[in-house]
Amino acid sequence: MERVRLAAKRALRRIARNAPGQRNLRREIAGKERLRWWLIYGSTRSGTTYISELAKSCASLWIGDWRLGSILAGIEEYREVSALPNHDHIEFDYPRLLRDLSRNILDTAYPGDGRQLDFVYKQAVLRPKEHRCLVAMWGPPERVIFCLREPSGFIASARIKFPRRSVEHLQQQYVNSLEQYLQIGGDIIEYVPDLSLADYQAFLAPLDFSGVELPEFRYTGEQDDANTSEAMWQVYRKIRALAQEGAAPG
């Protein structure tokens, strides 16, 4: 039943993407030198989907977890290599590659529900090289949001969502995801039980949600201290301390 629901949802998105006016809108956005865009990232199971649902209600276009990391990181690695000394024989058109990739993403992105932003890009477990490639395409995002969740709640939720992955893999993925924040930075929001829709709306200011029907926030999850590691708690405390200080590395 869930598979049918998701297939129907994807079909509706394709119909909306081809609606009158969408082609001109996408062409207009693609023609901008710098996009008005927001970046949302964090570990899996940390509320990235919910907050991107809110943000996309104020954006023309959006995507979520398209897993473009291998492509984006590969492009950034190529740029780094081609910029090395003794590589001036390489005449590959790197700016054209970025333009073509940008146009592909914007042409196929989901339609949003507003016009306050051009684009919202949401990707859990974002790597720094992916981030640098996105910035090369669209300029720095107007806002970067990092979603944080404490280790016990994360591991309990992740073990249900990803039953084939070992606990050790999930633990390391969590540590890696949080360590990326030290290079990418951004505003931190922590996924905790006492959050409310009003809290999210305040955090997402200056986006104006007047007249927009928004999904209510509902915290889900249990605790699983037994399957956390000390490394998870160490990096969590480090990032949480930065959030409390209002620091934003990157």
Image (cartoon, grey):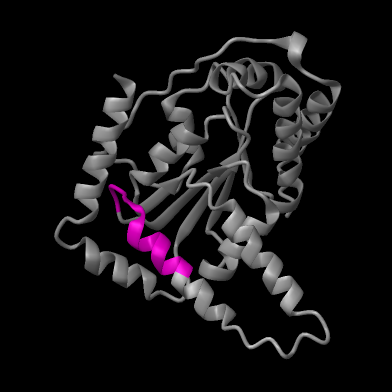
State the image coordinates of residue 201 (x, y, percent, origin top left). 43, 36
State the image coordinates of residue 190 (x, y, percent, origin top left). 61, 29
Is 106 included in the stretch rendered in magenta? yes
Residue 34, placed above or below residue 188: below
Residue 131, placed above or below residue 24: above
Camera sees residue 131: no
In this image, 196 relative to 164: left or right? left
Residue at (54, 21) in percent of width and height: 161
Residue at (40, 64) in percent of width and height: 104
In this image, 208 relative to 157: left or right? left
User: Quadrant of residue 36 in the image?
Assistant: bottom left
State the image coordinates of residue 222 (x, y, percent, origin top left). 59, 10
Residue 108, placed above or below residue 231: below
User: Quadrant of residue 166 in the image?
Assistant: top right
For the record, the magenta segment spans: 101-114
Which one is nearer the viewer's eye here, 55 or 75?
A: 75
Farthest left residue in view: 20
Residue at (59, 69) in percent of width and height: 136
Camera sees residue 157: yes
Is 113 included in the stretch rendered in magenta? yes
Residue at (69, 16) in percent of width and height: 152
Residue 231, placed above or below residue 22: above
State the image coordinates of residue 241 (x, y, percent, origin top left). 78, 33
In this image, 41 relative to 229: left or right? left
Question: In which quadrant of the rendered image does the N terminus lie?
Answer: top left
Which one is nearer the viewer's eye here, 46 or 229?
A: 229
